Every structure is written in structure tokens, then in C-alpha cells.
Image (cartoon, rainbow, N blue to C red):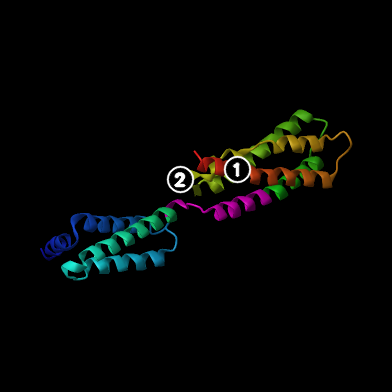
């Protein structure tokens, strides 16, 4: 009965929308506790919000209090969303994807060297199939790492530039180069391919912003 009276008083003081929104925020915070970033800061914001709702004030303070409560609610909801979905800034997109592309430069170069050493290059069909399988595996691995990182609501894994398979053609052309195999050239061409992918992704993001 005491809890009911308290709830009725809170609604009378603050309006039902504010009180119900506060209750929903508490529920969201508990649901996303394990996935939300900067949890300690969110808890402090939530405690401040509850103190504001419970605080006594005169009628002249009402509008100011209502505005402060709404601002705090929006701030908390924004952080819950960004913490749960890993919404990225453009700098975070560049840092994350550049790290994966730089890793790909190294791994694909090593794959070329390994294939050349371990496989019989005269069986071109088998080598072709192996290279394309490796490329698809690397792309799927990259997409799985980027799936939970969003740009404006779209997972980074869904941008086409993340999934380009043309590296397979570069690897095969280097393995069967008519003027002989050159490690320096392989490395340079693979690096160039992934540097171009970085630019392609950035341009794709810009185009997505303009939709």
C-alpha cells in the first residue's frame, strides 16, 4: 500500500509520462547491464535522475525540473542504445576497419607464400579453388568481427567494400606470373589492394550518409 501511495504521489508531482519513462529506463538498464559500455557512468546518471524525480520542489520549479529530467532521460537512452549496438563514430570505423585490413595484408601475403611452398602449382584448378576458399573464409571472418559495429544503424559487415573478393585474382596472377614470382611485388600489390579497400569503404559510408 505504501508503494502504491508513493507511485501515485510521483505521478502527481511529475506526470505519468516522466514516471513511466523512468521505470522503463530502469528495466532497460537491467537488461543491458552486461552489454552497455561505461556502466558506472550510466548508473550515476540514473541515480541523479531518480533523485531529481523524488526531489520536492515548488510549482515555480516544475518546468525547470521537467526539462532537466527529460534531458537526463534522453542522455541515458542514447548511451544504452550506443552501448548495446556499438554504434561507431567515423574515427572508430576507420580505426577498427583499418586494423582488420592491415591484418589482411599480412595474412594474405603469408597465404601466397604458403600456397607456393606447399601446393603443386601445375594443378591450377586445385590452386584456384584453394585461393578462392581462403579468400571467402577471410571475408566471413572479417564480417563476423564487424557485425555488431554499426554506422548510422547499418552493421559495418553489410557494406560491400568489406567483402571484395578481387584479392583472389591478384594472388593467382602473382602465383602464375609469366615473368616469375617476386615477393616484393606480391607484398606491394596486396598492400595496394587493401589500401584501396579502405578508401572504397570510406566513400561507401559517405554515399550512405547522403541517401
Q: Quadrant of the N terminus?
A: bottom left
Q: For this view, does 126 lie left or right of residue 44? A: right
Residue 136 at what x, y percent from top left? 63, 37
Q: For this view, does 109 lie left or right of residue 101? A: right
Residue 56 vertical position relative to residue 126 in the rendered view, above or below: below
Residue 148 visible in this rendered orientation of the protein: no
- Residue at 51% across / 43% down in the picture? 209
Q: For this view, does 136 lie left or right of residue 24? A: right
- Residue at 69% across / 47% down in the picture? 195
User: Which of 18/188 is in front?
Assistant: 18
Disc 1 to disc 2, C-alpha distance: 17 Å
The kind of secondary structure element at disc 2 is loop
User: Which of 76/135 is in front?
Assistant: 76
Q: Quadrant of residue 25?
A: bottom left
- Residue at 60% across / 55% down in the picture? 95
Residue 54 vertical position relative to residue 167 in the rendered view, above or below: below
Q: Would you name the residue on which mark 1 appears?
A: 203
The kind of secondary structure element at disc 1 is helix
Q: Would you name the residue on which mark 2 appears?
A: 153
Q: Which residues are magenta?
A: 84-103
Residue 82 vertical position relative to residue 207 in the rendered view, above or below: below
Amino acid at each position: 500500500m505504501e508503494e502504491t501511495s508513493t507511485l501515485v504521489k510521483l505521478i502527481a508531482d511529475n506526470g505519468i509520462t516522466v514516471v513511466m519513462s523512468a521505470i522503463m529506463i530502469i528495466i532497460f538498464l537491467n537488461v543491458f547491464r552486461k552489454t552497455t559500455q561505461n556502466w558506472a557512468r550510466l548508473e550515476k546518471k540514473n541515480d541523479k535522475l531518480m533523485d531529481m524525480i523524488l526531489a520536492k520542489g515548488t510549482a515555480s520549479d516544475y518546468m525547470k525540473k521537467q526539462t532537466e529530467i527529460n534531458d537526463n532521460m534522453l542522455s541515458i537512452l542514447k548511451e544504452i542504445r550506443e552501448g548495446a549496438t556499438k554504434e561507431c563514430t567515423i574515427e572508430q570505423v576507420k580505426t577498427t576497419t583499418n586494423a582488420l585490413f592491415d591484418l589482411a595484408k599480412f595474412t594474405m601475403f603469408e597465404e601466397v607464400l604458403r600456397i607456393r611452398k606447399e601446393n603443386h602449382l601445375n594443378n591450377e584448378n586445385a590452386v584456384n579453388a584453394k585461393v578462392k576458399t581462403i579468400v571467402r573464409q577471410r571475408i566471413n571472418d572479417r564480417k563476423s568481427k564487424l557485425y555488431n559495429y554499426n554506422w548510422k544503424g547499418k552493421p559495418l559487415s553489410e557494406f560491400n567494400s568489406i567483402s571484395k573478393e578481387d584479392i583472389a585474382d591478384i594472388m593467382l596472377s602473382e602465383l602464375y606470373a609469366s615473368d616469375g614470382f617476386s615477393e616484393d611485388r606480391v607484398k606491394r600489390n596486396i598492400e595496394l589492394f587493401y589500401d584501396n579497400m579502405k578508401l572504397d569503404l570510406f566513400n561507401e559510408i559517405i554515399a550512405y550518409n547522403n541517401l
